[in-house]
């Protein structure tokens, strides 16, 4: 759960960094997209070879992450069959209580996201055009802004929890440090991902 | 101290035996002194019930000074009834001055499959004993106590070990956990024994055996939510769970961690 979660967070940061190339311009962005698809780690890998290894690792991380989550969920259901008539939340945050249902929502939107930009992009010849066309629509920007809230809530608890599971929560201070880092990563992901769509919507990019 | 009396309404989980269905039953209790402990208030209710010829409410208790770990019920949704107070407490050390006249108080047993209900508010916590039997001990020869200075212990480790050792095994961590995980209890024992020199020989085998037993008994897994530590009457910190995970990861690379 922890290891696969951290792999996925690392991917998100890498993905976010790549997206920001849209600010440099059409050529840079399309060239980067082309490099990802065909030239990454060429000539160690054949042209277009590494991307499939990369996708395979991502898929494996995602599947293992979901498998661990489902196992934990089923164990919890088995261990706690009768819920309390009255239950008060003392410590847990809203994001931590939304890890499971939130995870399902994320997985659902992920399918849509892959369909929108990878499987059936608006302009297969130019990723830049696809992105700019879609994010010129206010409802797509709003939709992604909301989806990202779910992503970042999941990352906020997940980041801290992953490090705690790996043994890094050694004291009250390290708890605070890990939680602060989790907030920074979550906010970074939010801002980094939402900047391009918002700038496209307001005509700062691609107009 | 002025003797203030309050009238309250209790909603108590009544279940005649393990196999029969239970339900919440409402009992008004009048003239409760605010100096009473929560258990004394239950004693008062039981006296009234006995006089009326009804079955008294069964609940666990022993020392009534917060050190034995015997008592424990979920009061208004929090184990031991700490509620929003910053002070951690056991049920026996919770006093009626924390409640107001006219309050409706819901009292339920610990709810977790590994802690089956025996009767009313009494649950069977022998699952914790089984976790201890699996590895929560050190093997030493009995006899004269060894010279205390023979095995130096750094103060920081002794303190941390002792903090973890204050766990009284009441089960509030399991009751508080939405996953019904017993990780805080298990981790407290791992930390208590694993930081002292006497605990070293069995350290990496212990963690594997204890967590293996914990999982086999049907406790849930940890999500690092923090509810357990918040409900703990002894303020066992959440970081003992990281200590357990650390030992568990290390045990995979240690020869003496092999079963």
Image: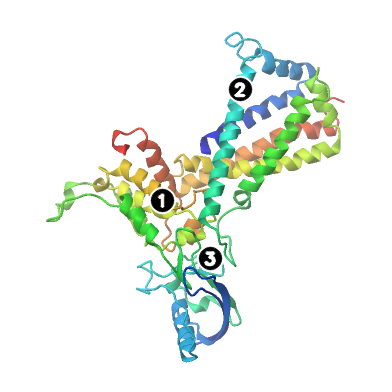
How far apart marks 3 and 2 lie (CA) works out to 46 Å
B23 horizontally vs B123: left or right = right
Foreground disc of the pair 3, 1: 1
Residue A12 locus on image (x, y percent): 64, 32
- Secondary structure under the numbered disc 3 in the rendered image: strand
Q: Nearer the viewer, residue A175 or B242?
A: B242
How far apart marks 1 and 2 lie (CA) works out to 37 Å
Q: Residues within 10 Å of mark 2 (few under 14, many from 20)?
A: few
How far apart marks 3 and 1 lie (CA) works out to 23 Å
Query: What residue would you read off at disc 3?
Result: B78
Q: Nearer the viewer, residue A37 or A53?
A: A53
- Chain assignment, label 2: A
The extreme left residue here reads B144
Q: For the residues tagged 3 and 2, is the chain the same?
A: no
Q: For the residues tagged 3 and 1, is the chain the same?
A: yes
B1 horizontally vs B140: left or right = right
- Chain assignment, label 3: B
Query: What residue would you read off at disc 1?
Result: B214
Tell me if residue A185 comes above or below residue A25 in the rendering.
below
Q: Nearer the viewer, residue B253 or B229?
A: B253
Tell me if residue A192 comes above or below residue B128 in the rendering.
above
Is any part of residue A48 visible from this angle? yes
Foreground disc of the pair 1, 2: 1
Tell me if residue B147 comes above or below residue B70 in the rendering.
above
**Mark 3 or 1, nearer chain start:** 3
Could you say which disc has been placed on residue A54 in the image? Answer: 2
A147 horizontally vs B243: left or right = right
Residue B19 locus on image (x, y percent): 49, 68
Foreground disc of the pair 3, 2: 2
Residue for point 44% across, 82% down: B43
């Amino acid at each position: 759960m922890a290891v696969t979660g951290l792999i996925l967070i690392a991917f998100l940061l890498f993905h976010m960094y790549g997206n920001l190339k849209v600010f440099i311009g059409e050529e840079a962005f399309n060239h980067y997209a082309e490099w990802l698809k065909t030239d990454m780690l060429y000539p160690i890998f054949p042209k277009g070879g590494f991307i499939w290894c990369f996708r395979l690792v991502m898929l494996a991380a995602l599947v293992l992450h979901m498998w661990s989550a489902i196992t934990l969920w089923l164990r919890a259901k088995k261990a706690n069959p009768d819920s309390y008539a009255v239950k008060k939340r003392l410590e847990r945050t809203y994001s931590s209580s939304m890890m499971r249902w939130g995870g399902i929502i994320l997985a659902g939107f992920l399918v849509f996201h892959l369909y929108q930009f990878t499987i059936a992009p608006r302009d297969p010849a130019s990723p830049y055009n696809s992105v700019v066309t879609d994010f010129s629509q206010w409802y797509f920007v709003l939709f992604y802004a909301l989806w990202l809230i779910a992503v970042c809530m999941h990352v906020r608890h997940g980041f801290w929890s992953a490090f705690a599971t790996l043994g890094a929560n050694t004291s009250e201070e390290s708890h605070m440090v890990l939680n602060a880092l989790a907030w920074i990563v979550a906010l970074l992901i939010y801002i980094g991902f939402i900047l391009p769509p918002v700038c496209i919507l307001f005509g700062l990019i691609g107009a | 101290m002025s003797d203030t009396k309050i009238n309250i309404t209790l909603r108590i989980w009544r279940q005649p035996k393990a196999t029969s269905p239970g339900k919440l039953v409402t009992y008004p209790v009048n003239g409760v002194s605010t100096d009473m402990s929560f258990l004394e208030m239950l004693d008062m209710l039981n006296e009234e019930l006995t006089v009326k010829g009804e079955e008294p409410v069964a609940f666990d208790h022993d020392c009534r000074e917060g050190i034995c770990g015997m008592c424990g019920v979920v009061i208004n949704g929090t184990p031991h009834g700490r509620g929003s107070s910053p002070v951690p407490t056991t049920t026996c050390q919770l006093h009626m001055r924390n409640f107001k006249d006219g309050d409706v108080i819901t009292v339920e047993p610990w709810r977790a499959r590994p802690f089956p209900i025996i009767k009313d508010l009494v649950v069977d916590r022998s699952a914790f004993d089984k976790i201890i039997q699996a590895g929560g001990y050190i093997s030493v020869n009995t006899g004269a106590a060894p010279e205390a200075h023979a095995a130096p212990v750094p103060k920081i480790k002794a303190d941390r070990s002792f903090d973890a050792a204050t766990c009284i095994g009441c089960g509030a961590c399991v009751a508080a956990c939405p996953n019904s995980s017993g990780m805080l209890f298990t981790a407290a024992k791992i930390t208590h024994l694993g930081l002292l020199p006497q605990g070293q020989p069995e350290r990496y085998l212990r963690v594997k055996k204890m967590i293996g037993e914990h999982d086999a008994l049907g406790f849930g897994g940890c999500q690092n939510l923090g509810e357990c530590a918040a409900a703990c009457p002894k303020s066992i910190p959440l970081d003992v769970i990281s200590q357990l995970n650390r030992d568990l990861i290390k045990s995979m690379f240690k020869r003496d961690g092999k079963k």
